[in-house]
Image: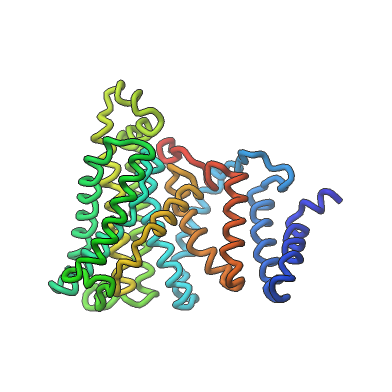
Amino acid sequence: MRRFANSPLFIALWAALLFLPFRDLRSAGILFALLFAFLSLMFVIKKVKPLSCLPVRLRLPDMAGHRNILLLCVPILFFTFPFFMQNYYLDVLIMFGIYALLAMGLNIIVGTTGLLHLGFVAFYAIGAYTYAILNTRFGLGFWICLPVSAMLSAVAGALLAAPALRLKGDYLAIVTLGFGEIMHITLNNMSRLTNGPNGIIGIEPPSVFGVSLGRPDRYYYLVWAAVLLACFVIRRVTGSRIGLAWLAIRDDEIAASTMGINAMKYKLLACASGSFWAGLAGIFFAAKMRFVSPESFTFMESALVLCMIILGGLGNTYGAIMGAFILVLLPEVLREFQIYRMLVLGVGIVLIMIYRPYGILGGGSESART
């Protein structure tokens, strides 16, 4: 009986019965199906212990034997999505890719180097507004603005970091938070350049040889090609001497300095690198929406991206993508629950952080060890 009580079927059925008074039978059935599928995946495929037996620091089984199969199946599955999915779901996957870029960029700063950054959305805004202004006012195309937006965000990240990195801990977080708010106010008040709170409209989508990539089924491939490139580059960098220096600074900056590591130099490089990917995400966002406004770049965006990397695992590139997957796609899956979906999402995140305090995929430096 106890074994049955810990089974995915019993847990999903009990949760659905508890949810039934709040909604109708159809919604409770959807919750049962989703919860049963998720728990079955956790219990059967990953062979996770029942909830009553879970330790505080749960260890997932070694998936190294299945890595080659996963690396082959996942790209094939993602490649086939546009052939059978509606445009709405493709738009969600595109936003998932954009947030994955943001999460991987912030993961370099916070997860790998250990610098608490609360104004990351500012560099996201710089990339988006750079393309919006250059395209609508000067007629420059997407491919010309792509490196310009990314590099300008990287330069802004380094310029902010130069004085801010003299501070540490909470003081550094306050400075970066202030920079994010300054950027938001600046975008609102510089009406001649940014059109103020009304934003900039009429942004052109990218095109290749005269063929527009603005359609979701085409833009999807462009965004995810950038995500794969970012994942490859970031893992290569974090596995190099630069990445090892970042990890040393994160673990003990004083010890790293005594070993000859120029802490200021590598922290500046980390901020510039993370901001580069934020600017890249910004130009993809502007080209997709064809409209930008200051309200798209508030502090809540920085907090959301920070939650993604904490949820997936600090210092884990794949964990950043996993966190983006959960916090972008799961609210859409739970849209059926309307006002209760954020409650369900919040409870799920709390449970994950209780049983996986270092993130779903674990923190640390997998990339540096592989």
Quadrant in which residue 79 is drawn: bottom left
Of 195 and 1, the residue lying toward us? 195
The reply, left or right, for residue 305 in relation to residue 192 is: right
> Where residue 124 appears, x then y in whole percent?
30, 58
Residue shown at 28% from the left, 31% from the top: 263
Residue at image coords 70%, 71%: 22
Q: Looking at the image, which residue is at 59% across and 51% down?
A: 350
Identify whether 87 is placed above or below 265: below
* Foreground of the two, 335 or 339: 339
- Left or right of 354: which side holds 317? left
Q: 255 above or below 24?
A: above
Rendered location of residue 217, percent (x, y): 39, 74
What's the coloring here?
A: rainbow
Left or right of 310, for residue 171: left
Most extreme residue toward the top is: 258
Residue 231 appears at what percent x and percent y?
37, 51
Left or right, residue 355 beside residue 208: right
User: 165 or 365: which is nearer to us?
Assistant: 165
- At x 48% / y 47%, what residue is drawn? 310
